[in-house]
Image: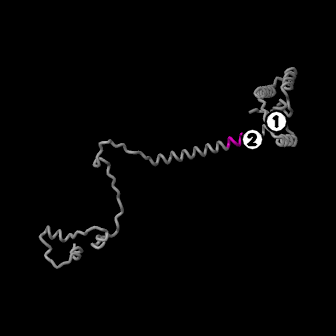
Amino acid sequence: MSQFPIDVDAEAIFLDGSWYTREDLSRRIRAMLDSGDFNVARPSMALQELTQMMTGVRTLAFRSPPELADALTQLASRLQQSVGAVIREAVTQYITDANSSGQQQHQQQQAQQEQREARSEVTVRATMPLPTSTTAEELPKVIVNEPQPQSAVIAGPGALKAAGVEPVELTQRKAQAGGGSGNPEDSSEQRWFKQ
């Protein structure tokens, strides 16, 4: 970016309150040296910047509908600028806005990527490779600790029969294993709850 304002259309640079072309600056520097004033650093720098700018300037052409061309000409005359200056300013603003919104989008995408990476560091999902000859006994065992109910619920014989499960009378097994219960008149339901 130039240290001095440059008018590309007029091929002039603003220095010490006046606009100078390359020829004007050359004459000014020569006059300063002829008069014994060797403080030509600023005019020389301005001449160098103007020369570099004008060497790199490119002419662009674009097509426009008549309404846009007329509106552009009216705006330039109202602003007391050339049409080229208005177009350069508009394009510069457009590029600046596009770059800043592109930068914002890039920053948002980067933040989202960082969030995804943070989540992936917390949760790692990997399958455990198993050899084809693995048996069920060799697989890792999963133990789930379920909360125990505060009071144990025991299903009676009616609930078991309703569920399609035949209740087993534990007292009869004891009796068979231990030689009998000793009281044959106990009903099966009473024997069930005695245990």
- Give the residue number, with chain letter if any, for mark 2: 93
Q: Is residue 105 left or right of residue 191?
A: right
Residue 103: give x, y in percent of width and height: 64, 42
Instruction: Name the disc covering residue 84, or none.
Output: 1
In the rendered image, is residue 185 in sight?
yes
Residue 66, image x and y in percent? 84, 40
Position of the C terminus, as image quadrant, is bottom left
Three-letter residue code for mark 2: Gln
Rendered residue at 77%/32% (across/down) = 60
Q: Residues within 10 Å of mark 2 (few under 14, many from 20)?
A: few
What's the residue type where badge 1 is placed? Gly
Total numbered labels placed on residues in the image:
2
Which is nearer the eye, 99 or 27? 99
Horizontal and vertical percent position of residue 135 = 28, 46
Q: Residue furthest top?
A: 34
Count neighbours of disc 1 (C-alpha within 10 A) and say few if under 14, some if 14 to 19, many if 20 or more: some
Q: Give the Cα distance between marks 1 and 2.
A: 14 Å
Q: Residue lying furthest bottom in this view?
A: 185
Can residue 41 be spotted in the picture? no
Report whether 162 appears left or right of 67: left
Identify the residue shown where x is 56% and y is 46%: 112
Q: Which residue occupies the foreground of this view, 42 or 139?
A: 139
User: Which residue is painted at 84% across and 23% down in the image?
Assistant: 26
